Amino acid sequence: ETGVTQTPRHLVMGMTNKKSLKCEQHLGHNAMYWYKQSAKKPLELMFVYNFKEQTENNSVPSRFSPECPNSSHLFLHLHTLQPEDSALYLCASSRVEERNYGYTFGSGTRLTVV
Amino acid sequence: AQKITQTQPGMFVQEKEAVTLDCTYDTSDPSYGLFWYKQPSSGEMIFLIYQGSYDQQNATEGRYSLNFQKARKSANLVISASQLGDSAMYFCAMRERGYQKVTFGIGTKLQVIP
């Protein structure tokens, strides 16, 4: 266990469904991130939250909607997804002021859109 | 332009041997940090090692060392005494000054042969 927990581990959803991914950390970190990992492509940063405030949206389609109710929890709400959205979605956390350390990642949610 | 380049899609190494995974980066910022992550089949990204652009010595963490050649913009990961558990994807990443986000390469798949 890394200290960052993602649920569910696997998710299959239809294109008309609405689902949410959850990420939770109890490491005392104050920044949280969503990354998308597709086969044979570099990890793509989707969203950044610092102290619960969204500081970066990397041109992500509106069918992905993040929510960060507090510094320990991060959600990614999904609706009307496309098959090309199938990927591994990774959550990470860090302390904004500690730049010498890498992010702490969760194990990811493997999403399949059918 | 790609900021992180990993040119080895796959590598094989004999157990107990050393292996070098290549990484080159591109930045005009004099202050930056370089990271290596390991991703086993379970999916989670594990932080291995960090090198700052102003660090005089190459970073080491146990069996991992980073061969940092600043003029060549190269940050190769060296794993000594490979173990079967080292079989995984390895990602090189960079954080530039003033930017919170970490940019990743496409990864190298390492397989350790008994």
Image: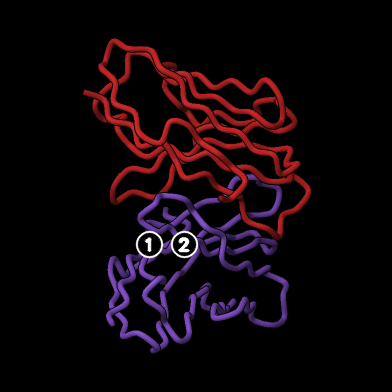
Chain colours: A red, B purple
| Quarter holding residue A16 | top left
The correct choice, above or below, for A77 with respect to A106 in the image is above
Q: Which mark is residue B38?
A: 2
The correct choice, above or below, for B60 with respect to B110 in the image is below
Same chain assignment for discs 2 and 1: yes
Q: Residue at x 71, y 44 (%)?
A: A27
Q: Circle 1 marks a residue in which chain?
A: B
Please report contact status of discs 2 and 1: CB closer than 8 Å, yes or no. Answer: yes
Neighbour class for label 2 at 10 Å: few (<14), some, many (≥20)? many
Quadrant of the snapshot with the C terminus of chain B? bottom left
Instruction: State the SS at label 2.
Output: strand
Q: Please, which residue is most extreme toward the front here?
A: A1
Q: Amino acid at mark 1?
A: Met
If you read the primary sequence from the N terminus, does the residue marked by circle 2 or circle 1 appear first? Answer: 2
Q: Residue at x 41, y 75 (%)?
A: B21
Q: Please, which residue is most extreme toward the right here?
A: A97
Q: Please, which residue is most extreme toward the bottom here?
A: B17
Q: Residue A20 location in percent, x, y?
A: 46, 20
Q: Which mark is residue B89?
A: 1
Q: CA distance from mark 2 to mark 1?
A: 6 Å
Q: Residue B84 location in percent, x, y?
A: 36, 75
| Quarter holding residue B6 | bottom left
| Quarter holding residue B109 | bottom left
Q: Residue at x 35, y 55 (%)?
A: B41
Q: Is residue A11 left or right of residue B64?
A: left
Q: Please, which residue is most extreme toward the left here?
A: A114
The foreground one among A44 and B19 is B19
Neighbour class for label 1 at 10 Å: few (<14), some, many (≥20)? many
The foreground one among A110 and A40 is A110
Instruction: State the SS at label 1.
Output: strand
Q: Amino acid at mark 2?
A: Lys
